[in-house]
Image (cartoon, helix red, strand yellow):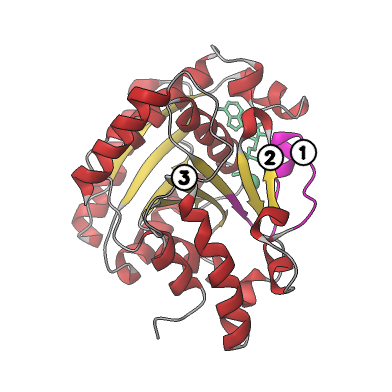
């Protein structure tokens, strides 16, 4: 499964790198998309900026990407993209609303879906409602190779539900002690509840690379020793004033400042996501949905 996925992505990269993402849906087995949840212990560390810009970089590398804004407290993918959602995921509960109606287009044709408040009660919906949502949402995997989910921060039930349902988790932190402590709390909860463990660190707002590497090493050692869990580091993003400027301009920095330091770091991360060693599709998109809508228990 892992090598197939890598091969498929390499083929896409090889043949599609120059082209805009195709509009029409391509036939792929349903549920084959990689589902990657992006989370953090502490809020405000850069999840939404990472999600949006990583999505754009993956897309540039030829992958078909879908972003889901699932930060229920502070949904702001819209803000970073400079777009306005016309609908959200829960509108799908209306019979007449189709996936196309809630699918939004951002810069560079980036597709995203706004989660909308209420999704945290997904498990309490009636069976019919859950089946309706699952049925409509399953088709996302037909047009996406990678589905990135911008979750909220912390250990709330909703956030945990999302990160436990995803095959892969990127845990974002800054090198600050408060962010690291909160990241460790997420690692601890994840180590206790995740059946298959695939969590990687991303360190944002790095000034001093050597110091940040040292900090990551300590976190990794602590995880191995006390949680019995290995946690790789996917990469670093440097502190870059272009990030703040791009947020103000409501244009992702990958678009507004394609060669700024943060953009270059994001391209590195995208490469690591596409060709890194720990890519896995176990549950895929369908598995994710089944778990979110509690069809497993
Ligand atoms: N690499 C960076 N360099 C400089 N500022 C950053 C960087 N990453 C994030 N920021 C700042 O942090 C703010 C919060 O980022 P955001 O992605 O909204 O965080 P979250 O989604 O985790 O709440 C941004 O508006 C930006 O000002
Ligand atoms: Mg956010």
Of labels 2 and 1, the one closer to you: 2
Cα separation, mark 2 vs mark 3, equals 18 Å
Q: Which residue is mark 1?
A: 83
**Residue under the point 50% across and 22% down:** 19
Query: Horizontal and vertical percent for residue 119?
Result: 64, 70
**Residue under the point 37% across and 42% down:** 201
Label 1: how many Cα within 10 Å (few below 14, some 14–19, many 20+): some
Q: Is residue 297 above or below residue 237?
A: below
Task: Say what secondary structure mark 2 lies in.
Answer: strand
Q: Of the residues under marks 1 and 3, which one precedes in the sequence?
A: 3
- Proximity of marks 2 and 1: CB atoms separated by less than 8 Å: yes
Q: Provide the residue span drawn in magenta.
A: 68-87
Say the numbered circle drawn on residue 26: 3
Q: Of the residues under marks 2 and 1, which one precedes in the sequence?
A: 1
Q: Is residue 67 visible?
A: yes
Q: Of the residues under marks 2 and 3, which one precedes in the sequence?
A: 3
Q: Using the image as rendered, state which of residue 124 and residue 127 is in the foreground.
A: 127
Q: Which residue is mark 2?
A: 105
Query: Horizontal and vertical percent for residue 127?
Result: 57, 87
């Amino acid at each position: 499964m892992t090598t197939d996925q890598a091969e498929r992505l390499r083929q896409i990269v090889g043949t599609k790198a120059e082209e805009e993402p195709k509009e029409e849906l391509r036939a792929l087995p349903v549920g084959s998309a990689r589902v990657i949840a992006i989370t953090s212990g502490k809020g405000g560390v850069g999840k939404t900026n990472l999600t949006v810009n990583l999505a754009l970089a993956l897309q540039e590398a030829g992958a078909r990407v879908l972003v889901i804004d699932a930060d229920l407290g502070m949904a702001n993918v819209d803000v970073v993209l400079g777009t306005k959602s016309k609908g959200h995921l829960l509108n799908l509960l209306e019979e007449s609303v189709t996936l196309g109606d809630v699918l939004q287009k951002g810069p560079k044709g980036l597709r995203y879906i706004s989660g909308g408040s209420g999704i945290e009660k997904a498990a309490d919906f009636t069976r019919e409602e859950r089946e309706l949502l699952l049925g409509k949402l399953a088709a996302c995997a037909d047009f996406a190779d990678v589905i990135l989910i911008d979750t909220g921060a912390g250990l709330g039930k909703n956030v945990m539900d999302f990160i436990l349902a995803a095959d892969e988790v990127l845990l974002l932190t800054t090198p600050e002690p408060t962010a690291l402590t909160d990241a460790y709390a997420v690692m601890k909860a994840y180590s206790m509840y995740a059946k298959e463990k695939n969590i990687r660190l991303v360190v944002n707002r790095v000034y001093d690379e050597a110091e940040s590497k040292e900090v990551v090493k300590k976190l990794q050692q602590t995880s191995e020793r006390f949680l019995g869990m290995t946690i790789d580091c996917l990469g670093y993003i440097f502190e870059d004033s272009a990030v703040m400027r791009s947020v103000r301009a409501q244009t992702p920095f990958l678009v507004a400042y394609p060669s700024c330091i943060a953009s270059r770091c994001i391209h590195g991360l995208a490469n690591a996501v596409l060709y890194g060693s720990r890519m896995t599709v176990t549950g895929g998109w369908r598995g994710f949905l089944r778990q979110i809508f509690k069809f497993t228990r």
